[in-house]
Amino acid sequence: MIEHLKVVEYVGEIVGLRVADKREAEYQSGRRIQYKSACYFFRIDKEHIIDATRKGGIARFVNHSCLNDYLGLMQVVFFAERDINPGEEITYDYHFNSEDEGKKIPCFCNSRNCRRYLN
């Protein structure tokens, strides 16, 4: 049996999709310098997003990789299935919704099962 060690919890404000869409537009607009055109969202199901942009912790800086997967309900905790070496990047699959070809975000994770796009 593999022992899973808690690495970090993804915290923020849980919001619905309409609120998330409005906030994303606000963050991307660059009108507020503190966001620097960045937003930190984690989709936890089909209707809810954790918005870590204003009230998040360090887990919001975990990057995407097609290789990794996660489990979560209304709480998202990253667990390690193996030892993590000092300085090793921690990644997970963002599970973005699929978009039209013109709105695709390229993926550069270089994992063996890379899907080429984040969405």
Image (cartoon, helix red, strand yellow):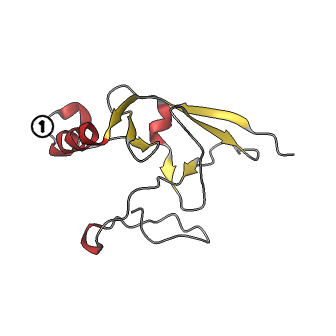
Residue 112 placement: quadrant: bottom right
Does residue 85 sit above or below 59 in this rendering? below
Is disc 1 surrounded by few (<14), some (14 to 19) or many (20+) residues within 10 Å? few
Local SS, label 1? loop
Q: Which residue ends up furthest to the bottom in the rendered image?
A: 101
Q: Which residue extends farthest right? A: 1
In the image, 116: left or right of 33? right
Is 17 above or below relative to 15?
below
Q: Position of residue 46 (x, y in %)?
A: 41, 48
Q: In the image, residue 45 lies at what x, y percent? A: 46, 44
Residue ranking furthest to the top: 55
Between 86 and 116, the residue placed more toward the observer is: 116
Residue bearing the label numbered 1: 31
Residue at the extreme front of the image, as rendered: 47
Percent coordinates x, y for residue 35 in the rendering: 25, 35
Name the residue at 53% across, 31% down.
Answer: 75
Q: Which quadrant would the C terminus be assigned to in this image?
A: bottom left
The quadrant of the picture occupied by the N terminus is top right
Q: Quadrant of residue 28?
A: top left
Image-based side of 79 in relation to 119, left or right:
right
How many numbered tags mark residues here? 1
- Relative to residue 52, is residue 98 depicted above or below? below
Identity, as a three-letter code, of the amino acid under mark 1? Arg
Instruction: Give residue 13's position: percent from left, percent from top.
Output: 38, 28
Q: Quadrant of residue 106?
A: bottom left
Residues 100 and 8: in front is: 100
- The residue at the point 59 percent across, 53 percent down is 69
